[in-house]
């Protein structure tokens, strides 16, 4: 077979002649998944000629991931690794087109370092007593803006936090005292610290010229936001005089049931407290971004308080002092972030879009929306000064690589090929998108994958995968935890349905799941399964296994009580009892919105679609998986599910990870997860590489 050639160079790319290499190919398995190099966080240089990015790799011996910095020329001529330290390096941020600041753990904690991209040793820039959580280089390289986790009640937050953490580490007692929620969040117990944005001035040599100034002094809120935020949560005006950031600053425990993130504005000298910009909106405001000339501020805003899956609109206000106006009210998609073009003439955004993630260009004056890239999963749009567009793309058969779209809109150029040789050795199952008429008479979409190397005339089992969220999508996307091609490589046909509640099909479709968890979504899944079996007679309807995580895990438990059409079920981090799940969890706004209020005010809503009330019907063999550090869907829900199965006499198994959260992140645990899941499905479907 002919293999694509990987171009990697130091100054000039290696010549990549067409080489014919005889090589064995094989269906994909979890070891291929773990071996892939993961491209993340692309950042173009100011002149647009280069892009710095992060590559994550899995170290099986250490049972953890590691990160390094790479560079690529945006014309595709050069791809090279620039850091090789045993410690991780990440978050590259350009000072100019020759120098990059970045975060590294090589000093024993996460600090800022810098290096020249044309060679030379990295130089440590900060030596703070706390880790640097996020980094942004200020305009004109006059300052660094850092996200630090500190005790906000300290006069000198950085020094005080370091000293307090040392005292806590030396404390002999282990009891924790709380006077308000959050007690814990996702996978971390709260200790009173907050993420705050600090400014450190830089001298002409590019090194710190003063102390770190807390621009959120005494603010009882987080920026970067917790747990997913980064430097996209704040923006600095081009004159380096003003910081705008997003944070939820509410009254005490209200933080756990409010989604009122606001934009705040503060002078970068830290002389005065911040002022709230978005007082009128009690819903979520996020992702502020100044235009290149500083004349406008763009951001994202929801309209419904308490609803984390509301549609984000793109907002723009003249700066300073202008009224905010909605740019995209007529655009029925929800962007995940925004970025200005260097000339300020366009705003770019990516959004879920009918089973894909597309990139759009938005007019900052008229709000006109133009789709630029519609197929596959496209993310991290970065417009370049010459009109080209740098972006990341992945799909069901390829992890993320970087591409550049020409200014005239021609065919994008793939500029990285980090996994090309690995992919060439893998046999994938052919995939296609399909649709059918589901609940409410709506068109519902999904993806279907054939078993790798399918033999005509042979009957195959089906893996029926159910996504989480529930406001999410099983789109044309390479996934490192729920990769459907793994099942295709193991001998299964695979189907995934974007049921009512999924994103990318309009806000009304997303909203349809509210108060109806076991209704329309379940109907869509069953009708989608019927459609797949009707289209593909070579699938054995008696050998279908369903698997899901989070909401998908909830749906597995719901299915267990509604039908016995499946040969086996796999429930990962799924709820059994929606009423108790409310009291177990931490982000209370989520169940309060989905079930119409609190369980004491609306008990019938929680009970209506709670799987626990149908345990008497359970009979399908089920594998239950849970992580002890999952504070979102608490592990007692998984243990309770297993107890119910055992007491009912249903064949069942519990896979419990004491060191994992809502996901399975450690590479060896991921391998074990896949082995146990496939073994369970094989046991009840007699599957495994196309066996009958």
Image: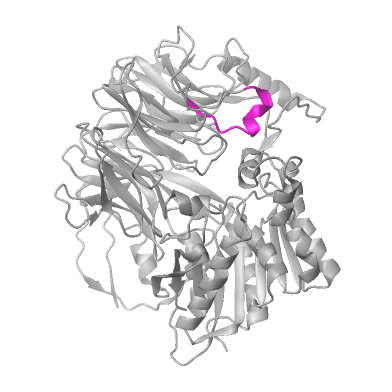
Q: Residue at x 49, y 77 (%)?
A: 532
For residue 616, side relative to residue 299 (left or right): right
Q: Is residue 455 above or below residue 373?
A: below
Looking at the image, is 576 positioned above or below residue 491? above
**Residue at figure coordinates x 58%, y 16% from the top left:** 157
Residue 549 lies, in percent from the top left, at 61, 58
User: What quarter of the picture does the N terminus occupy?
Assistant: bottom left
Question: What residue do we see at 53% from left, 77% from top?
Answer: 530
Q: Is residue 253 magenta?
A: yes
Residue 688 visible from this viewpoint: yes
| Residue 650 relative to residue 332: left or right | right
Foreground residue, 427 or 586? 586
Q: Position of residue 399 (x, y in %)?
A: 40, 59
The number of numbered discs placed on residues in the rendered structure image is 0
In the current view of this chain or complex, which residue is farthest to the front? 440
Q: Is residue 132 magenta?
A: no
Furthest toward the left, the residue is: 408
Percent across and percent down for residue 112 are 44, 28
Classify the position of the C terminus by image quarter: bottom right
**Most distant residue in the top direction:** 271
Whether 32 is drawn above or below 127: the answer is below
Report whether residue 671 is seen.
no
Q: Relative to the observer, which residue lies in front, 206 or 448?
A: 448
Q: Which residues are magenta?
A: 251-262
Residue 362, image quadrant: top left
- By what rule are the colours in the image chosen? one colour
Instruction: Please determine whether, in this image, residue 389 is positioned above or below residue 120.
Output: below
Place of residue 312 in the rendered image (x, y in percent of width and height, measured from the top left): 42, 40
When asked about the image quadrant of residue 238, the answer is top left
The residue lying furthest to the right in this view is 647
């Amino acid at each position: 077979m002919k293999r694509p050639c990987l171009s990697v160079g130091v100054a000039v790319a290696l010549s990549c002649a067409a080489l014919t290499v005889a090589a064995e190919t094989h269906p994909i398995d979890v070891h291929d998944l773990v071996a892939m190099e993961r491209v993340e966080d692309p950042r173009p240089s100011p002149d647009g000629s280069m892009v710095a990015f992060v590559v994550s790799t899995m170290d099986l011996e250490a049972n953890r991931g590691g990160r390094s910095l790479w560079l690529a020329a945006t014309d595709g001529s050069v791809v090279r690794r620039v850091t090789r330290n045993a410690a991780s390096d990440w978050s590259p941020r350009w000072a100019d087109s020759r120098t990059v600041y970045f975060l590294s753990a090589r000093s024993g904690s996460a600090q800022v370092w810098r290096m020249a991209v044309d060679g030379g040793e990295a130089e440590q820039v900060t030596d703070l007593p706390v880790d640097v959580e996020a980094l942004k280089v200020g305009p004109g390289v006059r300052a660094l803006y850092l996200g630090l986790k500190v005790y906000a009640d300290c006069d000198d937050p950085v020094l005080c936090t370091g000293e307090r953490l040392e005292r806590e580490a030396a404390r002999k007692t282990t009891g924790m005292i709380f006077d308000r929620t959050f007690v814990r969040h996702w996978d971390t117990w709260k200790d009173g610290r907050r993420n705050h944005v600090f400014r450190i001035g830089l001298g002409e040599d590019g090194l710190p010229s003063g102390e770190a100034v807390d621009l959120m002094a005494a603010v009882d809120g987080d920026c970067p936001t917790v747990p997913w935020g980064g430097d996209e949560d704040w923006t600095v005006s081009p004159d380096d005089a003003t910081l705008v950031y997003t944070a939820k600053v509410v009254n005490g425990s209200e933080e756990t049931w409010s989604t009122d993130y606001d934009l705040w504005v503060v002078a970068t000298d830290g002389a005065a407290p911040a002022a709230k910009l978005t007082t009128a909106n009690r819903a979520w405001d996020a992702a502020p971004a100044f235009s290149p000339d500083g004349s406008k501020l763009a951001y994202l805003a929801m309209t419904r308080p308490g609803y984390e899956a509301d549609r984000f609109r793109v907002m723009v206000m003249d700066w300073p002092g202008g009224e905010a106006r909605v740019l995209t009210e007529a655009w029925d998609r929800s962007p995940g972030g925004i970025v200005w073009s260097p000339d300020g003439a366009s705003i770019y955004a990516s959004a879920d879009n009918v089973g894909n993630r597309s990139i759009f260009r938005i007019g900052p004056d008229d709000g006109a929306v133009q789709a630029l890239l519609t197929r596959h999963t496209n993310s991290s749009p970065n417009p370049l000064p010459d009109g080209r567009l740098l972006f990341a793309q992945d799909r069901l058969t390829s992890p993320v690589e970087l591409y550049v779209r020409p200014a005239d809109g021609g065919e994008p150029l793939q500029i990285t090929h980090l996994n090309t040789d690995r992919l060439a050795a893998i046999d994938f199952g052919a995939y296609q998108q399909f649709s059918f008429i589901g609940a409410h008479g709506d068109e519902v979409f999904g993806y279907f994958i054939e078993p790798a190397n399918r033999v005509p005339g042979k009957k195959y089992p089906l893996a029926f995968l159910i996504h989480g969220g529930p406001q999410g999508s099983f789109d044309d996307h390479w996934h490192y935890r729920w990769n459907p091609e793994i099942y295709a490589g193991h001998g299964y046909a695979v189907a995934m349905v974007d049921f009512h509640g999924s994103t990318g099909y309009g806000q009304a479709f997303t909203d349809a799941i509210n108060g109806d968890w076991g209704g329309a979504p379940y109907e869509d899944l069953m009708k989608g399964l019927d459609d797949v079996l009707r289209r593909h007679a070579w699938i054995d309807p008696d050998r279908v296994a369903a698997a899901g995580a989070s909401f998908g895990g909830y749906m597995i438990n719901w299915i267990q009580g509604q039908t016995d059409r499946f040969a086996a079920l796999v429930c990962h981090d799924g709820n059994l009892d929606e009423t108790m799940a409310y009291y177990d969890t931490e982000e209370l706004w989520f169940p309060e919105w989905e079930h119409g209020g609190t369980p004491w005010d609306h008990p019938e809503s929680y009970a209506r679609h709670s799987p626990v009330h149908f345990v008497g019907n359970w009979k399908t063999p089920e594998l239950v998986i849970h992580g002890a550090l999952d504070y979102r869907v608490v592990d007692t829900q998984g243990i309770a599910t297993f107890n119910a199965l055992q007491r009912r006499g249903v064949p069942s198994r519990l896979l419990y990870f004491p060191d994992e959260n809502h996901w399975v992140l450690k590479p060896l645990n991921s391998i074990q997860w896949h082995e146990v899941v496939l073994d369970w499905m094989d046991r009840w479907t007699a599957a495994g590489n196309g066996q009958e």
